[in-house]
Amino acid sequence: MRRSLSKKEIVKRKPEIDRVFKTGKTYACLGLKLIVSQNQLDVDRIVVIPVRHYGSAVQRNRIRRQIKEIWRNEKPRMVPGYDFAFIVYPGKVNDHTSQKKQLLALCEKAGVFLQS
């Protein structure tokens, strides 16, 4: 079983990212901001953007990997057809459990979870 995101599940092109920022709704908590925008696809897509002053390149890449992994594990619970942009700000809390709580709380606010 593949344990990484496919190319279809990642927002890469600048015009697509700009569209998410222009048309999306914003939800925020301490250290993390979520912008959600509908797309015309049958899959959810993600982009993780640490702010420029977020540590070194190693730390920025690490936070990208961590958020993508949390999102990949929670993806089956989400309604398909959305683009997600996570903007990460430097903060004191960087452990996995608090990141997961924040991410799930923002997704819950956005209402992107399937009704069970």
Image: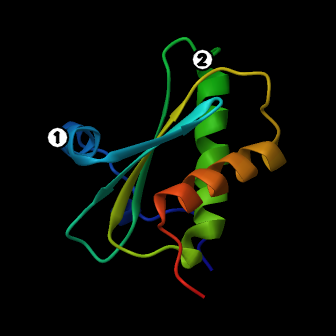
Q: Residue at x 82, y 49 (%)?
A: 97
| Amino acid residing under circle 1 | Pro
* In the image: residue 74, left or right of residue 42: right
Quarter holding residue 61: top right
Quarter holding residue 64: top right
The residue tagged 2 is 54
Query: Which corner quadrant holds the C terminus?
Result: bottom right
Q: Earlier in the sequence, mark 2 or mark 1?
A: 1
Q: CA distance from mark 2 to mark 1?
A: 24 Å
Please state the horizontal and vertical placement of residue 8, each as a whole percent of the image: 34, 64
Q: Residue at x 43, y 53 (%)?
A: 46
Please state the horizontal and vertical placement of residue 23, each as a whole percent of the image: 22, 46
Q: Secondary structure at mark 1?
A: helix
Is residue 39 visible in this depiction of the protein? yes
The residue tagged 1 is 15
Please state the horizontal and vertical placement of residue 51, each as a whole percent of the image: 50, 21
* In the image: residue 14, left or right of residue 33: left
* In the image: residue 25, left or right of residue 58: left
